[in-house]
Amino acid sequence: MIQSKLFILLSLFSIFISILSVRAQDTPQISHTTISGNSPELARTDIVLYKYTDYITHTEEIIDTFFVDTSGNFTCTFPLKHTQEIFMYLGVYKCFLFAEPDSTHEIILPPPREKTLQDEINPYFKHENISLGIKNPNPDDLNLHIYKFNNIYERFLTKNFQVLLVLRDKSLVDKLERHLDSVFKDYSHPFFDTYSSFRIYTLRHMAYERDMNRTTKKYLINSKPNYYNPPYISFFQMLWKDYILNNHMKELGTDMKQSIIFGKSPTMFKERLDSYVSFRNDTLQELILLQCLYDCFKDPITFPEQTVRQTLDSVIILTQIPEHITIAQSILSQQNSVQEHDSAPDFTLSTADSLPIKLSAYRGSYVYLGFCRSENLECIQNYKVLQKIQENTKGYIEIIIVSYEKDFETFSEFVKKNKENYNWTFVYGKNNSEIAKKYKASAMPSFILIDPNGDIELLQAPHPIDNFQQKFAAIYKEWKAKKQKEYKEQQFQRQW
């Protein structure tokens, strides 16, 4: 009897060890990557390094922040599971690099080119993408080959775009493929091979392989998803982005719509796709579902938001794929961005004297929260008006400016120099750009009004020069009257 129990325990232990071993093999080992360099033009600057959590939502995640010292030297070491794009914002540039685990990259940063006033106030401003240079790259450097490939590919596309689109000339694409094969015949790298292949597949689809079902079956059904390789997701989205919005009245689109609205079920969605030979791949089906759910938020009339959210929650619970959990969570996170009357996202930032300031500490008062920088002329014009507003509303409202100077030293010098005139609270926000994103402050200056309960009263409050004081006076008068009414009701209740 004892031997039997011992045998069972040993068997269970053996199974447990086997499961752990399999999971360990499936889980990417975390390695470390280092970037370094010298850029005297950016001396005394903090630079934030980002990556995308996924390429469906393009949600940005901070990897690390590094400091460029007085001599222009910098170095940054960070964990990295797999080869993927990392990037940083430098003025008008978005500088990117494909970083590899267990590698060191000596990078060359571009000369700084700051945003103009027009860029600052433009809510639709987009950074210029620029590939980071590698100093003394070895002949097998991944970024060097991607840059070389893109150079050939983009020149071809610029020259032949109209011909490919209208005439569907397969011979032109074949000619490019032969040329690329000859150029890169001696180079092989898993990331590069996927990158180059899916850029070619994109071109084929654009030129002559235009049947979505056949293209999906040919290039996606038997390939493992490459979640961190941009051309793979770009190709996938060329086929499936907005498909459900444009086809929900057609056969396949109707099946998708019903499984989301009525079933709220990833299982039902997959069962519907299983009836189509081109889509019989469980992982691909789930990725298609995630793209559809992301797109559904664009049409809340056809696809009620609550049902879409419930389906996303089901994906998070049921999926066995970590990347799909990340994508689903990112979709929900983007849809949970703040609205008026929501609680204002809290933050802690430093003053010019390096003292921490916490937004929630101002509960009980109205807060006029601004996002500005001293180099912006429109911000300075608003500061001059804000000075008068502060004199007129002292005791009624607190003013906090989140300032985005190029470095902390410039910020500190400006605040201390203007302490007598602009004697409200300034905090430094350059290293915490996600705060502005949470408040949807896409241009500078931007202003938000927060009520005494810590809720957002106005997400797009008038600027000081746009009669903010008059608007605030009306809001404060209404709030005061409401408080007085509540007080009288409380007094009346106490009497009885």
Image (spheres, rainbow, N blue to C red):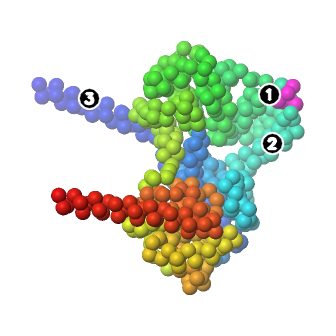
N-terminal of the two: label 1 or label 2? 2
- Local secondary structure at mark 2: helix
N-terminal of the two: label 3 or label 1? 3
Q: Are marks 1 and 2 in contact (CB under 8 Å)?
A: no
Q: Is residue 385 left or right of residue 350?
A: right
Which residue corresponds to mark 2? 154
Majority secondary structure in the magenta region? helix
For residue 386, what is the image quadrant? Answer: bottom right
Q: Point out the image quarter for the N terminus.
A: top left
Q: Position of residue 146 (x, y in %)?
A: 73, 45
Residues rendered magenta in the picture: 163-167
Which of the numbered marks, if any, corresponds to residue 11?
A: 3
Residue closer to the observer: 316 or 103: 316
In the rendered image, the vertical position of residue 230 relative to residue 304, given as above or below: below
Q: Point out the image quarter for the C terminus.
A: bottom left
In the rendered image, the vertical position of residue 191 relative to residue 477, given as above or below: above
